[in-house]
Image (tube, coloured by chain):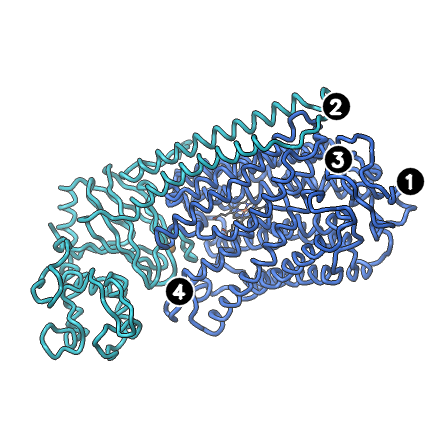
Amino acid sequence: MGFDLPLFPDQASTMATRVDYLYFYLLAVSAFFTILITAMLIFFAIRYRRSRHPHAVPIEGSTKLELAWTGIPLMIAMSMFVWAANVFFAMNRPPRGALEIYAVGKQWMWKFEHVGGQREINELHVPVDRDVKLTMISQDVIHSMFFPAFRVKQDVLPNRYTTIWFRPTKVGRYHLFCAEYCGTKHSGMIGHVVVMEPAQYQVWLAGGAQGGSLTASGERLFRELACDTCHRPDTGARGPDLAGLFGKPVKFAAGGSAVADETYIRESITNPAAKVVEGYQPIMPTFQGQISEEGLLQLVAYIKSLQTQKPAEAPGAPPAAAAPPPRGTQ
Amino acid sequence: MSTAVTTAESIHRRRHYLNADYGIRSWLLTTDHKRIALLYLFSITFFFALGGLFAVLIRLELLTPAGDMMTSDTYNKVFTMHGIMMVFFFLIPSVPATLGNFLIPMMIGARDLAFPKLNLASWYLFMVGGMFAMYSVVTGGIDTGWTFYTPFSTTYSNTKVIPAALGILIAGFSSIFTGLNFIVTVHRMRAPGLTWFRLPLFVWANYAASLIMVLGTPVLAITIVLVFLERAFHIGIFDPRLGGDPILFQHLFWFYSHPAVYIMILPSMGVMSELISAFSRKRIFGYTFVAFSSVAIAVFGFLVWGHHMFVSGQSVYAAMVFSILSYLVAIPSAVKVFNWTATLYKGSVSYQTPMLYAFGFLGLFTIGGLTGLFLAALGVDVHVTDTYFVVAHFHYIMVGGVIMGYLGGLHFWWPKITGRLYPEGWAKLSALVIFLGFNLTFFPQFVLGYLGMPRRYHAYPEEFQVLNVMSSAGASILAVGYLLPLFYLLWSMRYGPEAGPNPFDARGLEWQMASPPPTHNFEQVPIVSEEAYAYHTAQEVPVAG
Ligand code: HEM
Ligand SMILES: [Cu+2]
């Protein structure tokens, strides 16, 4: 290893450039004030040193000055706030049609599952110039998914799905870190994200699939666990029909409602009693501890896919929203 | 002047608080605020040394990218204990428990604090808390990080979480009692004529910090009890497997721990005001604003805890509110820096040791404060949070700011505390070495953080090594800087020349009594008829007796 002194990280996503511009603005403002204050300190300290200026001149203060140096920094601070909030909003709004990948964090590894069923550990392959969205959950403690070259990071929580998205702009291999302290091998919970040309990516996808697509695995689980004995679209079903459920508001027996998102679906499987759907009995058993996080993700993916497969069977539901078809090995 | 002393009488022959009584019992059972301040001084010096030892181990390990000096388990315990010792047993008590305890009664013309026995009890609680924390170290250590994030701390860590948490809980009560004592003392025991707006800014700053101690610390106590309940009895509070919410912990924890940063820094800011006015022989520019800004910081500091959680999954709108509030809280701190700088204008500036520390404070605090703007900026925080950028930022504020204030204040009032002068040359050298060592240690960490090196990493990718080596080299210089005062201050206690009551020709009631002060500070209650920092009236004594 030679003398290698990097001073700036790779810029490998659309977000990286946005964050960096803001960073340069902050740096410039900071440099300006640091220099200003240091210069004034040094100048006053020398100009008014005791040997040269033995008698201090009493000065009480100055409201005008006070207002100026409160007001101007306040305005600068607000400009930082607005700009930064803007970038943050973009980070938290995954674009539609993004390539969906699922991730599970556990002490101490990252597991990824692609829609086509490809799985990988501590390595993530993605195509360049394509929006990618990760839906993430932890199997134990809090972790944090961090891609320095993309300038994005998001905590990965137990019991709740969080998402992160990025659009890689440069082919290459970049660090993936766990940024939230998670125990003994926290610093070993690292990996790489490999950004590939689309054609290469196709080759990679084709080589990696095993055991069917995510939705197919989910469907298999759905049968194996006998979910379909209650959740059937025909009459007399004891549980609500799941087709067209994803993304729709659901009313609860105890009052209130929520939009059926990934976290809601997962909770309904692991803790069905928490939110019983209006019009049904709380008879569903809990599957807590019987399905791995990967299995839950497969079920969620399957239920998400149901709306496009049989939109007509969802009574009263508006036509399936703009959910893209399962992408799998496209 | 009521408390005038004849300096002709040497320290040995005169009765003062140090020789009023002899023997270990007279110290362990004392209710004199000055002696209790010294008890704190020795204890926190001990804890600081312990925390420093852990810091050395951390920096040694990080010299090389491979985690090859100790196991990752050990490393995790080392940085956890470093954090716990430094935050709860050094930074939080540093200025208030030592300088505050020593000075507040004297500065307001009182003979002691309002509750002298409670003050002694606070020190005992502090020590008992410290013992619990040390017990957890010697019986195997704790690896949760000083932030104790759940569910790791409640379910997954199989280290000594409970004794360490208990230690912090007990030490917390010590800080609540100290805060209460200060608040009541400042309200009830000011000398006649000493109105609120004649108080030294050091008193204002400690008053504001006390408000936080009293209002915030109970939340920490509750949080720790909840962690304990979940860990010991598996009651589901934070662990989702038991039906709890892991994020709830972070809200509770930061609701205390963010304001706690102000418990640490406000008293140091108070020291700054004293030093800068004394060594430029001027009243602080915009006294009223500086006084109110301390209280404003204390109050609004309670509203920004969410800025530690921008990537935790909280809603985008909550994040926006916390971000904008963080910017608003930053403004009073920034303005204080301008006020201090402006105080030098047309002053009569001397470069004695405490002033060098004050300059050091201004430099480090400015950098620490400005990098806070990066962390409050949502879009940038996402990238730098939980990286070394944060480590650098909080060291600049907490370690740079607080310790510069603490050491500056310790040097300033050392002649008052011990009656003797320290060797000026060595003291100046130490201020310089600390400033340089500090910057070399922590500045590279900003770069490391933006490059993406996460914090709490025992091993790291090779390309980060050069910056880490720089940081470790700086740490060894810094260590020398911190050790120097230990030696020459101890030396001066015996061999330093006698200081006399007011070696810096400063204003303030504490300078109008002998050094070291007599046990009851004032023979007669002084009557105050002047503003604080009455330098412009030259030779006149601002107190009528
Ligand atoms: C020679 C001086 C010091 C060095 C080299 C040093 C270095 C470090 C390092 C490398 C970390 C670990 C960061 C991480 O792994 O995330 C750390 C954490 C910390 N340090 Fe220091 N430190 C020093 C002095 C201090 C002092 C004097 C204080 C307080 C008075 C302090 C307070 C803390 C705190 C609160 C943490 C966070 C611990 C945690 O992440 O759990 N440090 N320090
Ligand atoms: Cu992790």
Name which of mark 3 and mark 4 comes first in the sequence: 4
Tag nearer the camera, 3 or 4: 3
Residue A216: image quadrant is: bottom left
Query: On the same chain: label 2 and label 1?
Result: no
Mark 2, chain letter? A
Residue type at mark 1 is Thr
Name which of mark 1 and mark 3 comes first in the sequence: 1
Q: Colour of chain A?
A: cyan
Total numbered circles? 4
Between B24 and B223, the residue placed more toward the observer is B223
On the image, the x and y values in percent for residue A75 come to 44, 35
Q: Which residue is mark 1?
A: B6
Q: Which disc is residue A54 wearing?
A: 2
Residue plotted at (61% across, 52% down): B92
Label 2: state its secondary structure: loop
Mark 1, chain letter? B
Whole-Å distance between the Cαs marked 2 and 1?
27 Å
B179 left or right, relative to B496 = left
Residue B535: image quadrant is: top right
Q: Which residue is mark 4?
A: B245
Between B392 and B470, the residue placed more toward the observer is B392
From the viewer's perspective, is residue B407 above or below residue B105? above
Q: Which residue is mark 3?
A: B534
Q: Colour of chain B?
A: blue
Query: On the same chain: label 3 and label 4?
Result: yes
On the image, the x and y values in percent for residue B323 come to 42, 46
Circle 3 crowding by C-alpha within 10 Å: few under 14, some 14–19, many from 20: many
Label 3: state its secondary structure: loop
Name which of mark 1 and mark 4 comes first in the sequence: 1
Q: Are marks 2 and 4 in contact (CB under 8 Å)?
A: no
Whole-Å distance between the Cαs marked 1 and 3?
23 Å
